[in-house]
């Protein structure tokens, strides 16, 4: 896809100075200083809550004076902060830029943005190269559920439980938390019956049926990807493309606990999982139903099943190398 270039003269910088085991503060300071040094007018949003962050970004983008609106929204944090800010920037056409300071930084990895060099990430912002990508949208019949966007992967079942447990742990730091969380979760409830309703199926792709339909299977987990990785590089949806108008599903079937323990290291190392119990599908929308199974989107809580996930083509503009 062609990438348009336009100068970035003003930026709304949304920061999570507690992200990345504490490196968020230094990353935000470096990013804001470098933008200012290069002549960018910077406004920082350091809101006390997710809802307040979304409100402040929306208000800025809706300013009745076009000259007062930012040329870009810059997110200094991890995938969780990005997921929050999507509620304000999706479908606006205003580009989202990333200066990664989280633990996983999977969207930044997918876009080719440096994850360990804030200055280089800011240079991507300054270059102003735009790309348009799809987003996923999650809906639920639960009365207290607010529809939400996701940019990378929605996990359900075992991997969602692992993510939720890891998010609640203060030790160990970094990706090792996910390993400890997985070992804890693998001893509990494991396989559940899933109902997978596929719509807008890409015929002839992966393990897809010949048309829209229903797959009923016992499974450990089902992951739905707009991009390929989650959890800091785990290759869960290895064939996903962020601009093809489709979502990729990876279904890990009823494998024994010991077999799952063998699969986890390969997944953690970013390797493709080739296993008879693993199936992959590609569709524009999917409804997942499984008793008591939780969901996480971009590493953030996304309720419990049933949920419906739909791709929204060209929903987000991002700044890329």
Image: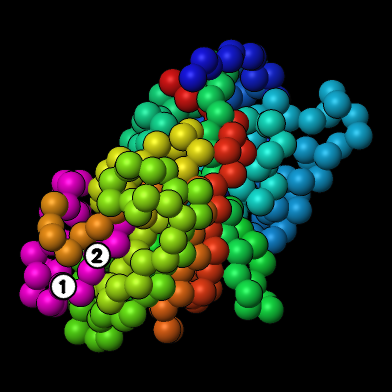
Question: Residue 170, percent across and down?
Answer: 35, 71
Quarter residue 114 falls in = top left
Q: How is the image coloured?
A: rainbow
Q: Is 156 positioned to the left or the right of 134 in the image?
A: left
Circle number at residue 252: 2
In the foreground, 27 or 185: 185
The one nearer the camera, 314 or 171, is 314
Q: Residue furthest front?
A: 210
Q: Is disc 1 placed on a helix, strand or loop?
A: loop
Residue at 84 percent of width and 23 percent of height: 67
Picture coordinates of residue 109, whole percent (x, y): 36, 37
Residue 255: say if magenta: yes
Marks 2 and 1: in contact by CB < 8 Å?
yes
Residue 173 in the image: state x and y as whole percent.
Answer: 29, 61
Q: Residues within 10 Å of mark 1 (few under 14, many from 20)?
A: some
The spot of residue 8 in percent (x, y) is 64, 19
Q: Is residue 312 visible?
A: yes
What label sits on residue 255 in the rendered view? 1
Q: Is residue 81 magenta?
A: no
Q: Quadrant of residue 308?
A: bottom right
Secondary-structure class at tag 2: strand
Q: Residue at x 56, y 29 (%)?
A: 132
Left or right position of 77 against 194: right
Q: Is residue 175 visible?
A: no
Q: CA distance from mark 1 to mark 2?
A: 7 Å
Q: Which residues are magenta?
A: 250-273
| Marking on residue 178 | none
């Amino acid at each position: 896809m062609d990438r348009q270039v336009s100068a970035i003269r003003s930026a709304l910088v949304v920061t999570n100075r507690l992200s990345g085991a504490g490196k968020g503060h230094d990353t935000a300071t470096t990013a804001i200083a470098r933008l200012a040094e290069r002549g960018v007018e910077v406004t920082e949003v350091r809101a006390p809550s997710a809802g307040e962050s979304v409100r402040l970004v929306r208000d800025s983008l809706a300013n009745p004076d076009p000259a007062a609106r930012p040329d870009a929204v810059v997110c200094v944090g991890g995938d969780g902060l990005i997921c929050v800010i999507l509620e304000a920037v999706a479908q606006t056409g205003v580009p989202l830029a990333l200066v990664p300071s989280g633990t996983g930084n999977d969207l930044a990895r997918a876009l080719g943005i440096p994850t360990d060099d804030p200055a280089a990430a800011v240079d991507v912002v300054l270059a102003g190269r735009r790309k348009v990508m799809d987003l996923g949208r999650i809906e639920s019949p639960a009365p207290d559920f607010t529809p939400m966007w996701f940019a990378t992967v929605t996990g359900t079942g075992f991997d969602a439980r692992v993510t939720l447990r890891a998010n609640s742990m203060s030790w160990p730091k970094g990706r090792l938390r996910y390993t400890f969380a997985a070992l804890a979760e693998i001893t509990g409830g494991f396989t559940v019956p899933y109902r997978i309703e596929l719509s807008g199926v890409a015929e002839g792709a992966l393990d897809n049926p010949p048309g829209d339909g229903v797959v009923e299977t016992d499974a450990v987990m089902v992951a739905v990807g707009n991009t390929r990785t989650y959890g800091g590089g785990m290759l869960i949806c290895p064939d996903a493309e962020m601009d093809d108008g489709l979502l990729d599903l990876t279904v890990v079937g009823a494998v024994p606990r010991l077999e799952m323990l063998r699969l986890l290291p390969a997944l953690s190392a970013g390797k493709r999982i080739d296993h008879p119990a693993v199936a992959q599908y590609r569709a524009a929308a999917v409804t997942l139903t499984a008793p008591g199974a939780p969901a996480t989107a971009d590493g953030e809580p996304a309720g419990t099943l049933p949920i419906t996930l739909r791709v929204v083509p060209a929903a987000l503009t991002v700044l890329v190398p």
